[in-house]
Image: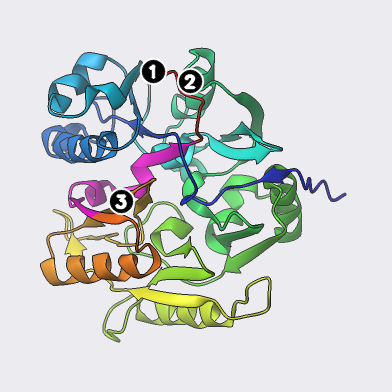
Amino acid sequence: MNDFNSTRRLPAEWEPQGGVIVSWPHAGTDWAYMLDEVTECFARIVTAIAEEQPVVVIVPDKNIASPHLLTANQNNILYVELPTNDTWARDFGPLSVTVGDKPVLLDFGFNGWGLKFAADKDNLLTLGLVEKGVLRAECENRRGFILEGGSIESDGNGTLLTTSRCLLSPNRNGEMSREQIEEYLRGAFGIKRVLWLDHGYLAGDDTDSHIDTLARLAPHDTIIYVGCDDDTDEHYSELQAMKRQLMEMRTTDGNPYNLIELPMPDAVYDEDGERIPATYANFLIMNKSILLPVYGQPLKDELAAQLLKISFPDHEIKKIDCSALIKQHGSLHCVTMQIPNDILPI
């Protein structure tokens, strides 16, 4: 049965937001072996967010994070002490819809990207934030359905973009068909349609091709995506196939999408010689600026910034070096989650 609810709406990321959630790295996470390096990166991200809007810093002990944020705008930082397994707040933080004119938080299940990693603490984060009064909004328990925030993109007008590799993964909601998953998403988010990308991946990615590493919805019927024109690169065939599928997609008016192709960063490898997933698509949209992950590749970093400016001419593009983050196979968007207006105590 179709439980589509026309009063529900899943906002686009570029709509007004009330703040951002960040989960701070600590010795109990996979960052332990490079904690100093990644802490510097998180400090840059939190400082940049706090320049313009509130940021909720989740940390087991406030004293782990606060010494690294002394130069940040303290009026916009709220420390919340909760246990976590890891730092990827995009995937275990709350997703939010509007029902009528009020925000409602959706608490989906998180199982470590298809049972790859421990997630018992992260899966309770949203509930913990609500119980502590940090997020002051109605919260729906939807933990019977596995869904990560990095796996979906919304245009705010009823279209959701995702990848079949992730949402149809047998270790997430494997008992459900594509049609059943679409039906569930319509009911949860009030969306009208789902656009599925069946191609595209990044070497070293643990998420089964999260959409926020590959293609992002943007204003004015635009999709910003990762391209690859080097036929010697291992991604070439898959990203070319993804590009062709994006070219075939149509807006609700039946028109092709405006497509903006981001460059593929030069290959980056870890200490074991394995390629890790550097991507410019993993940017965070805030109220007045966009935080763009960059990787110490000045020409491509700047090109990505200029291309983003096409879709977001009124936003300041701020580059954040995320070379540390990709060593654990994620980037800037992955460690942040925006939250609605007027639900924070600051």
Looking at the picture, how far across and down is residue 21, in whole percent?
39, 33
The reply, left or right, for residue 71 in relation to residue 332 is left
Q: In which quarter of the image is the C terminus?
A: top left
Residue 131 covered by magenta stretch: no
Write down the residue under mark 3. 329
Residue 330 covered by magenta stretch: yes
Disc 2 residue type (three-letter) = Leu
Question: Is there a contact, CB below 8 Å, between mark 1 and mark 2?
Answer: yes
Looking at the picture, how far across and down is residue 208, in whole percent?
47, 56
Most extreme residue toward the bottom, as rendered?
231
Q: Earlier in the sequence, mark 3 or mark 1?
A: 1
Residue appearing at x 30%, y 50% in the figure: 331
Residue appearing at x 44%, y 39% in the figure: 338
Looking at the picture, how far across and down is residue 310, in whole percent?
35, 70
Write down the residue under mark 2. 129
- Point out the stretch of residues depicted in magenta: 318-339
Q: Earlier in the sequence, mark 3 or mark 2?
A: 2
Rendering quarter of residue 263:
bottom left
Identify the secondary structure beneath mark 3: loop
Most extreme residue toward the right, as rendered?
1
Identify the secondary structure beneath mark 2: helix
Looking at the picture, how far across and down is residue 90, in whole percent?
43, 42
- Colouring: rainbow
Q: Nearer the viewer, residue 334 or 343?
A: 343
- Residue 76 appears in the rendering: yes
Write down the residue under mark 1. 82
- Residue 267 appears in the rendering: no
Residue appearing at x 34%, y 35% in the figure: 53
Q: Which of marks 1 and 2 is nearer the N terminus?
A: 1
